[in-house]
């Protein structure tokens, strides 16, 4: 079966888009969880939960990005590096 020439470019574009959205979403989710916990627990006088959950969101985002890249690297090694 013959693959189209531009399919690898679209695959790379979709991968980069997925990684960017995943990283941004995890940071935003962590930030909003911390923000609402600060609002609920500390009544807008503190920002400690916002900082903690923002950092947790950053860590979760990078963990997901690295796991995705590692799985892609493992797939390319088992494939022998051939894209054909």
Image (cartoon, rainbow, N blue to C red):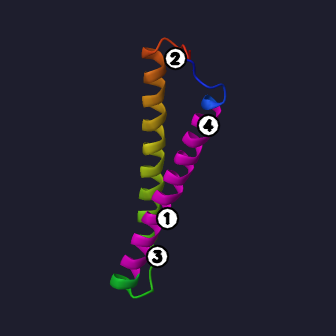
CA distance for labels 2 and 4? 18 Å
Say if 23 sits above or below 81 in the image: below
Closer to the N terminus: mark 4 or mark 3? 4
Residue furthest to the left in view is: 41
Label 4 element class: helix
Closer to the N terminus: mark 2 or mark 1? 2
CA distance for labels 4 and 1? 27 Å
Q: Is residue 29 magenta?
A: yes
Say if 30 sits above or below 21 in the image: below
Residue 30 visible, this orientation: yes
Name the residue tied to disc 4.
Answer: 10
Do residues under tags 2 and 1 come within 8 Å of each other at their CB atoms? no
Residue 51 visible, this orientation: no
Label 2 element class: loop
Say if 81 sits above or below 13 in the image: above
Do residues under tags 4 and 1 come within 8 Å of each other at their CB atoms? no
Based on the displayed image, in which of its 4 quarters is residue 13 positioned?
top right
Mark 4: few/some/many CA within 10 Å (<14, 14-19, 20+): few
CA distance for labels 2 and 1? 43 Å
Residue furthest to the bottom in view is: 43
Q: Nearer the viewer, mark 2 or mark 4?
A: 2
Do residues under tags 2 and 4 come within 8 Å of each other at their CB atoms? no
Which labelled disc corresponds to residue 1? 2
Q: Looking at the picture, how far across and down is residue 10, in whole percent?
A: 62, 37
Closer to the N terminus: mark 3 or mark 2? 2
CA distance for labels 3 and 1? 15 Å
Based on the displayed image, in which of its 4 quarters is residue 37 positioned?
bottom left
- Considering the image in quadrants, where does the C terminus appear? top right
Closer to the N terminus: mark 2 or mark 4? 2
Q: Nearer the viewer, mark 4 or mark 3?
A: 4
């Amino acid at each position: 079966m013959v693959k189209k020439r531009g399919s690898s470019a679209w695959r790379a574009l979709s991968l980069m888009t997925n990684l960017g959205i995943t990283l941004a979403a995890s940071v935003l989710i962590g930030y909003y969880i911390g923000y609402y916990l600060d609002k609920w627990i500390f009544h807008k006088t503190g920002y400690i939960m916002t900082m903690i959950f923002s950092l947790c969101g950053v860590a979760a985002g990078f963990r997901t990005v690295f796991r995705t890249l590692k799985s892609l690297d493992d797939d390319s090694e088992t494939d022998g590096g051939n894209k054909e």
